[in-house]
Image: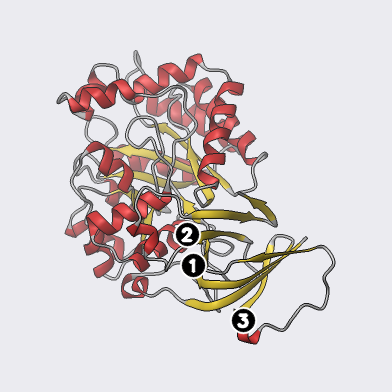
Amino acid sequence: MKILIKNIKSLVQVEQDVRLKVSGAEMKKLSCIENAWLAIEEDKIVDFGEMKDFPGISDWSNLQMIDATGKLVLPCWCDSHTHLVYAGNRESEFVDRINGLSYEEIFKRGGGILNSAKKLVEATEDELFESAMKKIREVILLGTGAIEIKSGYGLSFEAELKMLRVIKKIKENVSIPVKATFLGAHAVPVGVTKENHIENIINEMLPRIAEEKLAEYCDVFCERNYFSKEETIRILAEANKYGIKGKVHAEQLSHAGGVEAGVASKAISVDHLEFANENDISILKNSETMATILPGAQFFLGLQNPPARKIIDAGLPLAIASDYNPGSCPSGNMNFMISLACINYKLTPEESINAATINSAYAMELSKTHGSIAIGKQANIFITKEIPNYSFIPYSFANNPVETVILNGKIYK
């Protein structure tokens, strides 16, 4: 199968040399080709350029032509932090927060993560799979072309394995890369001490997960009343022994040392960062760990803004992900996430697009193949509706600018 897209108003995020991430002032740059064409064969980008230099078509066999007059072509969004395998919703907690309860108060009443864990135990694998597949289809049509999915609503050994098996089944049934993250250290199950739960994670869960190859990453919710910096380092050190790299829920509700734990553990990313401080930024400068912000969760919970502007101005890379989950971000719309980053954190459109493509691909170790338009990379792109320029995407917040998604030679509308 060959696809030729011609008359592209603007081909966005073009690279001649493949980069793994974009940092600091470079994030303000977004290379584009105006009035462009793009050629795809099978699942790869094979060529592109300006229409005035288009060489013509020598072989029309098995070729699909798309006229993108007035439309933009971008690499698909890469969503490096989601929890979209879950059972039921938590709209009652949404109302509780409106009535004045905090996230922590809801958790102490058996809500939050524990609420989702209870519902997940009651759901079958088939129910979880069908529900998750529906969400995946929705986010693909919003432009998402790679996604990470965490466990963490199981908490018990069997329930966590159930979640990870569902994620494995999703991998086998979708056209986008799916990365699996084990988040057994999301909360402490009812009736279990924290020390016993950590021992279960280290001695039972991690060996089995490694044996069955159920997760690429291990995450820990490093937060007051959840898991400490020292506990986070301990869990991630054990995961590293099995070749399972770390991720950290860091500095979301308070400053708990999550960034320090992530960097010390050589984590691929530290995510949330609302309470990250100047010292955390300094620590990140001497690491390969990606700072990742989750604007939807910050918006939905009414938390303080993460220091996104300071992170970039310090010369660091920054990624954007959705945190799609039932409690703190019931949306996987990455277009809205970059709008929030521009509006609330004063990121430029260029910075937010870089953060949601090449840098979020890095946070899933996919930036060699995804996150930009480059010859040899995966054909993982979307075509917008007729819009004036890429700044219109964050400007036109809460709307879907995506008309067509192309994944590995397949077209989705």
Q: Position of residue 389 (x, y in %)?
A: 42, 68
In the depicted structure, whether residue 167 falls above or below residue 337? above
- Mark pair 3, 1: CA separation: 28 Å
Q: Secondary structure at mark 3?
A: helix
Quarter of the image for residue 330 reads top left
Upstream in sequence: badge 3 or badge 1: 1
Rendered image quadrant of residue 111: top left
Find disc 2 in the rendering and name its residue: 362
* Labels 3 and 2: the sequence-earlier one: 3
Q: Position of residue 307 (x, y in %)?
A: 21, 56
Q: Is residue 70 above or below residue 154?
A: below
Name the quadrant containing residue 53.
Answer: bottom right
Q: Which residue is located at x 82 percent, y 78 percent?
A: 58
- Residue occupying the point 22% across, 34% down: 224
Residue 256 in view in this figure: yes
Which of the marked residues, 1 or 2, is nearer the chain's N terminus? 1
In screen coordinates, is 181 left or right of 115? Answer: right
* Amino acid found under the numbered disc labelled 1: Leu
Residue type at mark 3?
Met
For the residue pair 15 and 246, the one nearer the viewer reads as 15
State the image coordinates of residue 166 (x, y, percent, origin top left).
59, 30
Residue 129 is marked as none
**Horizontal and vertical percent position of residue 92:** 30, 20
The residue tagged 1 is: 20
Residue at the extreme bottom of the image, as rendered: 53
Asked if disc 1 and disc 2 are in contact, CB closer than 8 Å, the reply is yes
- Is 53 positioned to the left or the right of 146 in the image? right
Dot 2 amino acid type: Tyr
Q: Badge 3 is on which residue?
A: 51
Task: Tell me, yes or no, whether the two marked residues, 3 and 2, touch with CB atoms within 8 Å.
Answer: no
Compared with residue 346, is residue 55 higher up or lower down, i.e. above or below? Answer: below
Measured in 3D between alpha carbons, the distance from the residue under mark 3 to the one under mark 2, in whole angstroms, is 31 Å
